[in-house]
Amino acid sequence: MQFSGLTPKKVKEILDKYGKDDGLKKDKIHEFFRMFKDKNYCILIFLKNPIGIKPFEIDKTGFGAMSAWIIAKNISKVKRC
């Protein structure tokens, strides 16, 4: 789900509507509003059947220094041993 052209009012509406589903406690919504109120864009991703995994290091070689998201068909190709 994507939102663009955000205003503080729209940010508040998004936090109020989806904050709980995102794991935000109601008493913390205001803190997140202060952090995000001036943002212009929002992407919400909903996962089906997420599972916990043991944390691991990623080799970002070839993805650029600022890579935040990496798509890999085989996780062992980017997982550091």
Image (cartoon, rainbow, N blue to C red):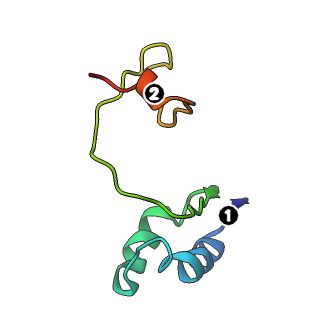
Q: Secondary structure at mark 1?
A: loop
Circle nearer the N terminus (2, 1) = 1
Closer to viewer: mark 2 or mark 1: 2
The residue carrying pointer 2 sits among few (fewer than 14), some (14 to 19) or many (20 or more) residues within 10 Å by Cα, namely few
- Point 59% across, 59% down: residue: 45
Numbered label attached to residue 6 = 1
Amino acid identity at mark 1: Leu
Please state, as top left, top right, bottom left or bottom right, where the C terminus lies in the image. Answer: top left
Query: Looking at this view, is 22 or 10 the one in front?
Result: 22
Where is mark 2, residue-wise? 66
The image shows residue 44 at horizontal and vertical percentages of 60, 61
The image shows residue 28 at horizontal and vertical percentages of 35, 79
Figure quadrant of residue 4: bottom right
Say if mark 2 contacts mark 1, CB within 8 Å. no
Q: How many marks?
A: 2
- Point 27% across, 43% down: residue: 55
Say if 41 sits above or below 64 in the image: below
Amino acid identity at mark 2: Met
Q: Secondary structure at mark 2?
A: loop
